Amino acid sequence: MRTLFVTGGAGFIGSAFVRLVLDELPSCEVTNFDALTYAGNPDNLTGLDASRHHFVRGDIADREAVRAAMAENTDAIINFAAESHVDRSITSADEFLRTNVVGTQVLLDAARERKVRRFVQVSTDEVMGSLPEDGNAYFTENSPYEPNSPYAASKAAAEHLVRAAHHTFSLDTVTTRCGNNYGPRQFPEKLIPLVISNALHDETVPVYGDGRNVRDWIYVEDHCRAILHALEKGQSGAIYNIGARNECRNIEVVEAILNKLGKPLSLIRYVKDRLGHDRRYAIDPAKTEAELGWLPLETWESGLRKTIDWYKENSEWIARTRSGAYREFYARQYGTEVGAD
Ligand code: NAD
Ligand code: TYD
């Protein structure tokens, strides 16, 4: 796999994946196709090898733009592009359907047209809904689809389209489903970067409901290495669940961060719960570990330490993201406003 078409590569996980493949696969070239929505940030791409990394701004739901950007000899498409925030999907689902559903179909069509060797769909454990809080149940690749938020439903729809392209047209596809990621460069609307950046500014941190919802956390680079393994070694048509066996209640996450930052727990504010809030996610990664020979490298302790250190050392990144200043950079750099077309 030498010529990769990565979508959403200016976002949190996509940019970590682009960094990883440029490091791990010295002969590969990456076209990074990203619409630069509010979550896409050119600051995430600084320092990449410009001879092997080609950024193209475009919308995955725009068929002509995808065709124009995709090299004839593209070996693989790795689809990270998505609207990714549950709370935004509760406010309005329109963009979620356009990007996550229509956009995925456009990419599948392009993959067939260009005879791309493999299509990797980056999906989420949230397509499987919520697990009982105190049970020993885990999500496996055979768990039923039970998406509960508009975001999860749009990602489940995308998985169905990927499955259909494999079944009907024999397209070589792999779908990965991961739990909650944390690490550098995550947009501070998600729990961990929000808590870190608010706490660093001595602002209160909002905890939804009773704070006892459980998420299964994984360091972003571990997720990206699993996707690379799936790209290189996954069975055609298969689904792989990716997780680090690291369940935590939200309140434990928040308290751990405040303690590590030396900030008082009095910054915690319990706020109104999210509508339809999933109680527990927990992934059984046994298939991925056994078939792909993958294991996470970071522990919760080491991953959280790296993450907190990164945000402390990159206060400028947080400031520019919070103020939208990276948009001004973009306008200067590219002569057009982010989101102008
Ligand atoms: P993100 O919101 O940080 O980044 C999404 C990127 O997609 C942004 O750069 C954005 O500009 C781009 N994008 C959005 N709409 C687009 C469009 N129409 N065309 C082209 N680009 C577009 O998201 P993330 O957290 O990096 O998530 C990446 C992928 O991983 C998503 O598919 C998400 O569903 C999945 N995922 C995320 C997590 C998590 O914990 N963050 C867990 C499991 C799976
Ligand atoms: P989030 O990072 O939005 O990821 P997801 O909804 O995809 O799991 O939220 C993680 C958990 O943290 C989720 O249970 C909701 C909760 N949460 C808060 O308690 N406060 C917040 O301000 C946010 C953004 C999330």
Image (cartoon, rainbow, N blue to C red):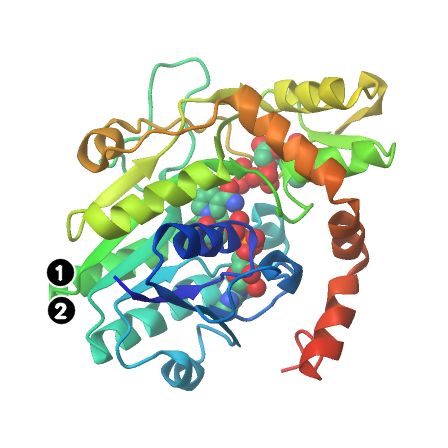
Name the residue rendered at 33%, 79% in the picture. 71
Residue 133: x and y in percent read 46, 18
Q: Which mark is residue 169?
A: 2
Measured as percent of width and height from the top left, residue 183 is found at 57, 38
Q: Is residue 223 above or below residue 42?
A: above
Query: Percent position (x, y) of residue 63?
Result: 39, 82
Q: Which residue appears at 80% of the width and 26% of the height?
A: 269
Which quadrant holds the C terminus? bottom right
| Structural distance between the alpha carbons of marks 2 and 1 | 6 Å
Q: Residues within 10 Å of mark 2 (few under 14, many from 20)?
A: few
As helix, strand or loop, the secondary structure at mark 2 comes to helix
Residue 22 seen: yes
Q: Which residue is mark 1?
A: 167
Residue under the image location 38 percent in, 49 percent down: 123
Total label count?
2
Q: Specify whether 61 is left or right of 39.
A: left
Q: Which mark is residue 240?
A: none
Residue 276 in view, yes or no: no
> Helix, strand, or loop for circle 1?
helix
Quarter of the image where one finds residue 142 = top left
Amino acid carrying mark 1 in the image: His
What kind of residue is marked 2?
A: Phe
Do the CB atoms of the residues marked 2 and 1 lie less than 8 Å apart?
A: yes
Q: Is residue 307 above or below residue 63?
A: above
Report the front residue among 264 and 149.
264
Q: Nearer the viewer, residue 299 or 46?
A: 46
